[in-house]
Image: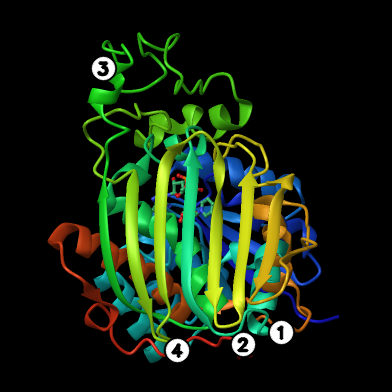
Amino acid sequence: MSVRKRYVQVGVGGRSMMYSQAVIETFASDCEMVAFCDNNEGRLNMRVKWAQEKGASVKGYGAGDFEKMIAETRPDVVIVTTKDCYHDEYICRAMELGCDVITEKPMTTDEKKCQRIIDTQKKTGKSCTVTFNYRYSPPRTQVKDLLMSGTIGEVLSIDFHWLLNTHHGADYFRRWHRNKENSGGLMVHKSTHHFDLVNWWLSSVPKAVYAMGHRKFYTPETADRMGLTQRGERCLDCPEAKRCSFYLNLRENEELKGLYLDNEKHDGYFRDRCVFSDKIDIEDSMNVLVEYETGAKMTYSLNAFCPWEGYMVAFNGSKGRLEHFCQESVYINGDGTVPGEMIAGQTTVKVFPHFKAEYPVEVWTGTGGHGGGDPILLADLFSSNPPKDKYLRKADQRSGAYSILTGMAANRSMATGQRVFINDLVKNIGIPDYPPMSR
Ligand SMILES: NC(=O)c1ccc[n+]([C@@H]2O[C@H](COP(=O)([O-])OP(=O)(O)OC[C@H]3O[C@@H](n4cnc5c(N)ncnc54)[C@H](O)[C@@H]3O)[C@@H](O)[C@H]2O)c1
């Protein structure tokens, strides 16, 4: 029998359970979870108890005891699923202490932290995997397949528009994501997925970025216009609860109550802050122009207050055009529903060759979170013998960096009104391993 890899996980909130289950249940013959770490004692104890009930021999450590945890439990790999702004601390410390890392997106939240991760990885030689689950969802892999096989020739320009609806989109304005110092704003926190997809779809990296953005929906003025004038700091005791379409009832949902409401006494983390608060400092509407090293140009937008959720992307190539449309289900992070499920019949791929009739392509399908991407990602991460992947979907710190740098450049461009060059932000990244493209 082969030796099982030893894992610890830092951050045991909404997203983290997927990884805990993969290590402790699905891939138990290849993996062993030996400890959890979190700054919230309540959530930490819950996860340790859950794992022990599954028969895992795990310990729990507070955030201040991270190094002690590494020394005592000697993991091979640290899984980082904390708040975005702390990723860099755990990624770098883990590599310095001799561990490989698997981290959730975004790899980190600003240029300085990104440079530190790039430098630390080079210095230590440890691996840093960034989990881009969107690459693995079958229709998005299919788009890669069509582009890399030269279906529309060389991609010269892209139109990409992502819509977050008033359930999922609003949720970014309720908790830590609402402040740039925690999340980098939606340009980093959310668009890292989209910018990574484009880098990988094109097998290229961004060169220059220009952006504009604002927040005009999730504001006190919008709430006043809706007649919601007696707002509280949070939904739980808000006098407007009955009249507000954005009311989130933490008491009613078992998952949200158990994970957040019951544990807020430990750290004051309120999961249901008012989406119209004047304390929010991220944009809810962003328009970005990106130039890639191949010369391709992209027009991208993200709006977080739409009636439906999903995206439209079109590639204009030297031999034709490819259009991909996707509508996703409604969900709220951590409420127990499957995140980012695609709605059957509402995901399409169409090719428009030059001088020939257009044709629809039968869409690849999958089940599970994020358009079926999560289960395939987990097998790639935790199986000791993952299938060979011609799409090279497993990503490291180089892809992690380029996916956030477009957003960081966009943030800088929004602040200065100037075009921003990626090379001015972070040095010595190296080019990610992308599959070759046919033309
Ligand atoms: N790939 C995806 O589709 C996807 C989806 C959701 C979330 N995420 C990512 O997963 C990560 C976690 O997000 P979430 O929704 O679970 O958030 P969350 O707020 O539910 O959980 C974060 C956890 O980190 C803990 N934490 C905070 N500061 C810490 C510190 N300094 N040290 C140790 N632990 C700390 C919190 O107590 C909490 O348990 C984020 O990076 C987020 O961007 C990715």
Nearest the viewer among 158 and 86 is 158
Q: Amino acid at mark 4?
A: Ile
Helix, strand or loop under label 2: loop
Q: Is residue 86 left or right of residue 95?
A: left
Instruction: From the top left corner, tell me how far across and down residue 375 is, in percent.
Output: 73, 60
Quadrant where the image shows the C terminus: bottom right
**Percent of width and height locating residue 321:** 59, 71
CA gap, disc 2 to disc 4?
A: 12 Å
Determine whether the residue tagged by mark 1 lies in a helix, strand or loop. loop
Confirm whether residue 312 shows in the render.
yes
> What residue is shown with label 3?
224
For the residues marked 2 and 1, what is the alpha-carbon distance in whole angstroms?
7 Å
Between disc 1 and disc 3, whose residue precedes? 3
Tell me the tag on residue 435: 2
Residue 386 position (above or below residue 223) = below
Q: Residue at x 31, y 13 (%)?
A: 228
**Local secondary structure at mark 4:** loop
Q: Position of residue 115 (x, y in %)?
A: 30, 78
Q: Nearer the viewer, residue 145 or 256?
A: 145
**Could you tell me which residue is drawn at 78 percent across and 58 percent down?**
365
Classify mark 4: residues with Cα within 10 Å, few (<14), some (14-19) or many (20+): few
Q: Amino acid at mark 3?
A: Asp
- Label for residue 390? 1
Tell which tag, 3 or 4, sits nearer the viewer: 3
In space, the residues marked 4 and 1 are separated at their CA atoms by 18 Å
Q: Nearer the viewer, residue 65 or 393?
A: 393
Q: Say what amino acid the circle numbered 2 marks.
A: Pro
Residue lying farthest to the right in this orientation = 1
Q: Which residue is mark 4?
A: 431
Q: Are marks 2 and 1 in contact (CB under 8 Å)?
A: yes
**Residue neighbourhood size for the residue with mark 3, other residues' Cα within 10 Å, grouped as few (<14), some (14–19), many (≥20):** few
